[in-house]
Amino acid sequence: MNEVLFFSVKHKNKLLIFLTFFILFFSFFIKDIKFTGSSNKFFIKNDPSYIFYKNILKKFGSDNEITISIQGDNLFTHKNLTIIYKMITEIKQLDGILEINSLFNKKNIVYKNNALYTNVFIDPYNIPIEKKQLEEIKNDALNNPLIYKNLISDNGKILLLNIKVINSSKHDFNIKITHQIENILQKYQNKLNANLTQFGTAYISEEIIKYISHDMKFTIPIAILIIFIIIYFILKNIKLTLIPIITSTLTIIVIFGFMGLTGIEVSILTAVIPALIILIGTTEDSYLIHEFVEEKNKLHTSKDIMIKIISKKLSLSIILTSITTIIGFASIYVNKIVILQDFAIVSAFGLFVNFLITIILVPIIFHSFNIKIHYEKTIKYTKILNFANNIFLYHTKKLYFILFLALSIFISFIPKILLDNNILGYFKENSQIIKRANYFKTYTNGIQSFYIIVKTPKKNNLKKWKYLHAIEKIQSFINSKKSKFNYSLSVANYIELINKEMHNGNNKFYKIPKSNFLISQYYMFFHRKYLKDYIDEKYQIAKIDVWHNIFSSKEFNKEKQLLENFIQKNIDPSIQVIITGKNVLLNKAVDTISIGQTKSMMMLFVIVFILISIAFKNIKAGFVVLIGNIIPIVSLFGIMGMFGIPLNVVTAVIATITFGIVVDDTIHLMIRYKYEHKNCNKITAISNTIKGEGRAVLMTTFSLIAGYTTLIYSNFIPVIQFAILSIIVIFIAMLSDLFFIPSLLKKINITKD
């Protein structure tokens, strides 16, 4: 094992050929890489609830919806309505459009002049010219509970088009349809002298992809640049500085090819992997470079001997740290959420590739190139390391007191951590998504939605008062002050409206009639196409659409529980009521985040403990690593609770990732201590370790911190939180390595004296 690095030098020609073909193979698949902004990635994999939801979509149609707002002061004119219908016709012709609901195809069910009218609000082939007639249509729409804030709003100054789009598996479909609709809106905006705005699932997905692409274009080159500057500033040597840039760049090429080959898409989370690989890969390179600089300064011997010495000193630590980091990232796979599993697969593979490239390429570079080092010009961090050594020698009691106080404070805030999986909460307040979301929240019934599925025992049951009244009761609760959900719509509302208008528009009759015969007659007012979104062809299963503006997972789940409690107490048990939809599935996934994180952390702790105990042939060494690195993890959760940073699919990976990263420095320190302790007593060995290996610890820490700052400029708030928290944890881990770990090594024997 100690000859791993020298093995690369002995077989460099064969290994370079292998590495070249390996990289070329994966680079061929980069062209197949795909981006995704789909919320489906946030669902639980193979969840029965998701399968049920997909079956509901097959029965009642796609939930991929786009809402277009047409805002203008004078929309109800013959000219403007004619233009609007032309625009609708043009949008209908786009591939993927299923239907467009508007005042041009929805029935105006109203009783007037001693007759019941059931024509569409606006006949597109006979648009009225008279102002009085148009005003009457507008008022009918504003007074219709099925239409207001669904197809018309703001006293008729806003018309809404609800577009149903196919749920396409093609990664670029949402981008394409959003762009096509945007082009049409731009075309008609001046013609109407109105503001035309689109919003919905496809638009959000397209915007997410745009933000991901922007982030990657920024973070990857900037991370490389920052690493280059930091390492060059420390080493003052171009050739050495280029090493981590070369290894990380080659790794990124392979990662992108791997994603193209496997079909794993670039998402909000997998998009940060290239930047992470640059940062994490740099740490291993930094230790090799640091040791090379040290040996170059001490020895005047052949390159072979120097590489052998470096190999003997670092092979074990490089292997161990790589394994622990890979396991750290791979352990995230125990989470059930698809986006987390994708992240675990790609990142673990990327770290393995980086390890492979590093152990092959770096020793060959050391051996093949004439690298001159001016040791006296390199930064040695002498003051910091002397201070750490001084604390270790004389002030351990003060150190323990400060540590105990800090941990007590952090632990007290851990219970305050919130679970949240709000997709809109991922965006900055000044982002276009949030601006549009706020606009549509104001003028519509809500921008979040879910379904309530009502299954009755037999077909044709939904032509009976008992079962329609059950739906009516559920909706009455939703529309009451007891619920924070905004609005609901079902087949019951259509029957209620007919009943009201059949009684001269008297609101007292806006309810389901108790006569089953009347209900059957009322159904005859509607063609099947008008009700297909709310009731199946057997009149056995109904769907209630519910809209709201609740974005907090905690609050949504609370409201959902209140609704479920009402249903359980007030609805006949023979009627099966199931709540489903993207909103429900997203919030259900939140509950698994903490469980998944706990599992991955425990798995990582156990594996690291076993590996270190075996490597040092002493279980005490395993305890030292765990104790030293639990401190930054406890601090992480305390800070999250202290500042109200939620636990979501992005921040959920921080603990596992940072533990996998920061444990590397601890392992390097302990292996250096073991090496030093062979030739001197414990106290001297620890001091030599602080001064010798501490420089590499500081170099990797500052490189990581500087590199993580690139993620602070992300378009996604959780990624920014991820960066800030990681920086804090890495810094705390450095303090633990330089101040606390030495004190543990002094008290706990991990080697024989």
Image: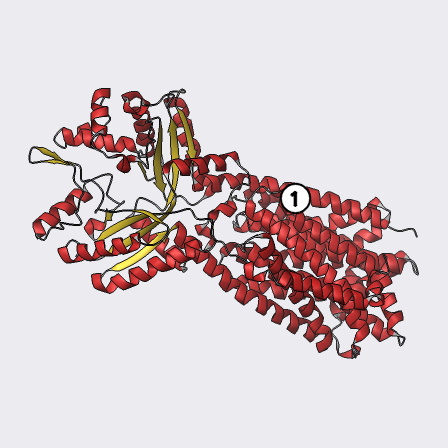
Say which residue label 1 marks. Answer: 600
Is residue 585 positioned above or below 701 on the image?
Answer: above
- 205 lies left or right of 257: left
- x then y, percent, for residue 439: 32, 53
**Label total for image:** 1
Element at label 1: helix
Q: Is residue 688 visible?
A: no
Q: In which quarter of the image is residue 287?
A: bottom right
- 308 lies left or right of 602: right
Q: Quadrant of the image for the N terminus?
A: bottom right
In the rendered structure, which amino acid carries the disc numbered 1? Ser
- x then y, percent, for residue 566: 39, 27
Q: Which residue is drawn at 12% across and 31% down?
A: 504
Q: Is residue 295 visible?
A: yes
Q: Which of 629 and 592 lies nearest the eye of the viewer?
A: 592
- x then y, percent, for residue 489: 30, 36
